Amino acid sequence: MSESKVHFFPSEPLVALLGNPNCGKTALFNLLTGSRQKVANYSGVTVERKEGRLTLDSEKNIRVLDLPGAYSLYPRSLDERVTCNVLLGRAEGEKRPDLVICVLSAINLRRNLRLVLAAKRLGLPCVVVLNMLDIAKRQGLQIDTAALSNELGLPVLTSNGIQSNGADEIKQFLSNLDWRNLDSLRTGTSDATLENVASHIAHTESDNVQVQKILQNLKLDRIIPDQLTDRLDAVLLHPVLGPIILVVLLFCIFQAVFSWATVPMDLIKDAVEYLGGHIAELLPNGWLRSLLINGILAGLGGVVIFLPQILILFFFILLLEESGYLPRAAYLLDRVMGSVGLSGRSFIPLLSSFACAIPGIMATRSISNARDRMVTILIAPMMTCSARLPVYALLISAFIPEQKLWAGIDLQGLVLFLLYLAGILGAMAVAWILKRFTSEQFKMNALMMELPGYHMPRLSNLAISLWQRAEIFLRRVGGIILVMTIGLWVLSSFPLPPEGATGSPIQYSFAGMLGQALAYVFSPIGFNWQISIALVPGMAAREVVVSSLATVYALSSSSADAADALIPLISSGWSLATALSLLAWFVFAPQCLSTIAAVKRETGGWKIPVIMLSYLFGLAYIAAFITYQIASALGLS
């Protein structure tokens, strides 16, 4: 995960944001910390943590921690357990928070207040922040913050996550706070433990009674429906219109991935060509020039050029998430997933796998049924992760013409959509087969999840999230991809060709020998020795396949600008049957080493990773073989 250059000091006061999912906690966190954030994982687990730094008017610095959303402090999932461990001071390498800010959604006090009552019993200094008051007022809810403060015995502040000054009241409160004496904000016992907290939570009836009493005293015990959300859900969750809208929406997103990215991709390509030209002028012909141009620049430039497409895809995913639509997508797909033997709870892990299979696999920890969790882990790698997008984009750009079909549909975007759809359908087919083998153990589990109200996404939140995604991608480019690219250049450059050699130097190198050997295995599916070489470092990270092909073809070609012309090189050197076969291969291709390690860690052994590698390799080879043979029979070879 990425980390910014902001330095965080353990001696600074630690403020933890606690709240239910969808209460606006993360929007408040972004307002408080802005770009001064770092993203990491909690020690020992892959549950994302966001930490930021806030400088108060008093010039005092405090650390702000955005805890995973929780419905209670009786942990039923890994992320809720992480929240409990942090609040109790049990998180490894993290001190207990000095102050807990309980973030409440003003439009759902009935559920949110239960978490506040549980937090009070921890003995930590607490303050309450009431969020989304503007939405509550539009729904006809009038909340007296002073009366709520009297009922809870805690200060109640207000915030607005969609305004730039929406956290000013909180910042002022924190600036005026005496951090050496917070006893006035402490209402519970200081020696609270997870065990006695659990005993309190076990008697939830008393909390329910107290919450109902608070709502009655505030004259908020009457449920007022959200008319806008209800009207939108009548259409978006319609049993017929809802799935159609979802498919059309996804289709339009993939159209935009290609059409919107053209200009920024051309700019990156021109910058790489310009830099390569200057290096060629400055350095004499030799190994250093070859390393910089044919190795590093060709490899990294071939991957970075696809960053705009990745960011466009993430932009739409974040937009749907911020607006509140993604949980509706889970609801719409629940029946379909159930028909193939998947629990509705598998949707979120599978959705996460479109970014990367690793967080998707980790997210299966929230699935209580062991059989459902194992099936979800096995098929999560079949979701098309962002690392595959550069490979898809390269092949589509090289072999699929830029042309418009009926109704202005872009052909390249249509092919990309079909590739994502093929991965989804393949995963559903595997899940259906596993259902047949585990029919006696299979049991449908109803999907229960909160559907938040619709709201306009905040552009600053989208910008921060996109920057973090770009930083993660560029760190991979500057890390594992750079290392693999240099390693491949070394293997492709040595040993030197013998005297009188007529072929390109790479053919006599270690990489060339390996490629020639692997070509015997992959020739039935149309792969040449250059592709065979690229598949090996591609096991480290999918994007490396693009940089590897750029390096191999730069070293294979006598053209001075070969590093800048990968698309023309493969479009003229490969048949369409080979390109289609490679696309089919990557729909099911075996996972990167990081994903295999994550599966081993989650399942506690090598059995499931070996099964996953075996069936994915088999599916990829069969799909590529069928595709290549059919394409060849049609004269596309």
Image: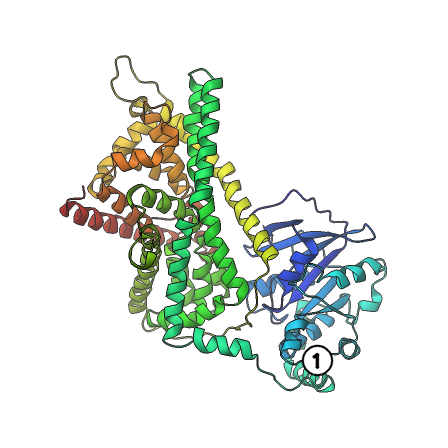
For the question of whether residue 48 can be seen, the reply is yes
Residue in view at x 23 percent, y 43 percent: 576
Q: Position of residue 46 (x, y in %)?
A: 54, 54
Q: Quadrant of residue 434?
A: bottom left
Q: Is residue 16 above or below residue 219?
A: above
Q: Which residue does the numbered mark 1 point to in the structure image?
A: 142
Mark 1: few/some/many CA within 10 Å (<14, 14-19, 20+): some
Q: Is residue 518 above or below residue 472?
A: above
Front in this rendered view, residue 532 or 388:
388
Q: Position of residue 452 (x, y in %)?
A: 55, 72
Q: Position of residue 485 (x, y in %)?
A: 43, 33
Q: Position of residue 231 (x, y in %)?
A: 50, 78
Residue 633 as seen in the image, left or right of residue 344: left
Q: Residue pushed farthest top? A: 499
Front in this rendered view, residue 259 or 397:
259
For the question of whether residue 601 can be seen, the reply is no
Q: Is residue 448 above or below residue 514?
A: below
Residue 251 as seen in the image, left or right of residue 107: left
Q: Secondary structure at mark 1?
A: loop
Amino acid at the residue labelled 1: Gln
Residue in view at x 27 percent, y 51 percent: 618
Work out which quarter of the rendered image holds the C terminus and state it: top left
Front in this rendered view, residue 320 or 55:
320
